[in-house]
Image (tube, rainbow, N blue to C red):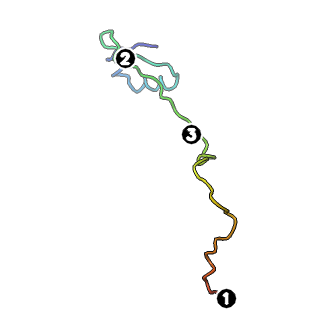
Amino acid sequence: MREIAISKFKAECLGIMEDVRRTGVPVRVTRFGKPVADVTPAVVESKGSWLGCMADSMEVVGDISRPIGAFKKWKAGS
């Protein structure tokens, strides 16, 4: 881990953060030789596949292929 004084970090903040992102090497920011903060690369979580995301979230009750009789009361075509 590289150490850098807080005054230098303040002057070169964007460049240091870009270097940490690109190389993955963390940087410790110090003040009077004592650690103040660690700049580490962000962990990017990959999105999983959406396929199967609803698995085991529903339960089928009864026969789903038989007609339910919702149209029996209609008198269309008579």
At 44% from the left edge and 13% from the top edge, which residue is drawn? 2
Residue 29 is labelled as 2
Residue 4, placed above or below residue 62: above
Residue tagged by mark 1? 77
Residue found at the far bottom of this picture: 78
Q: Along the polypeptide, which appears first: circle 2 or circle 3? A: 2
Residue 20 screen position, x and y as percent: 47, 23
Residue 17, placed above or below residue 59: above
Please tell me whether mark 1 sits on a helix, a strand or a loop.
loop
Marks 1 and 2, how far apart in space? 82 Å
Marks 2 and 3, how far apart in space? 32 Å
Q: Nearer the viewer, residue 59 or 14?
A: 59
Amino acid type assigned to the residue bearing label 1 in the image? Gly
Amino acid type assigned to the residue bearing label 3 in the image? Lys
Q: Nearer the viewer, residue 54 or 50?
A: 54
* Label 2: few (<14), some (14–19) or many (≥20) C-alpha neighbours in 10 Å: many
Residue 13 screen position, x and y as percent: 38, 24
Residue tagged by mark 3? 47
Residue 46 is labelled as none
At 67% from the left edge and 71% from the top edge, which residue is drawn? 67
Q: Are marks 1 and 2 in contact (CB under 8 Å)?
A: no
* Label 1: few (<14), some (14–19) or many (≥20) C-alpha neighbours in 10 Å: few
Residue 43 screen position, x and y as percent: 50, 29
Q: Along the polypeptide, which appears first: circle 3 or circle 1? A: 3
40 sits to left or right of 36:
right
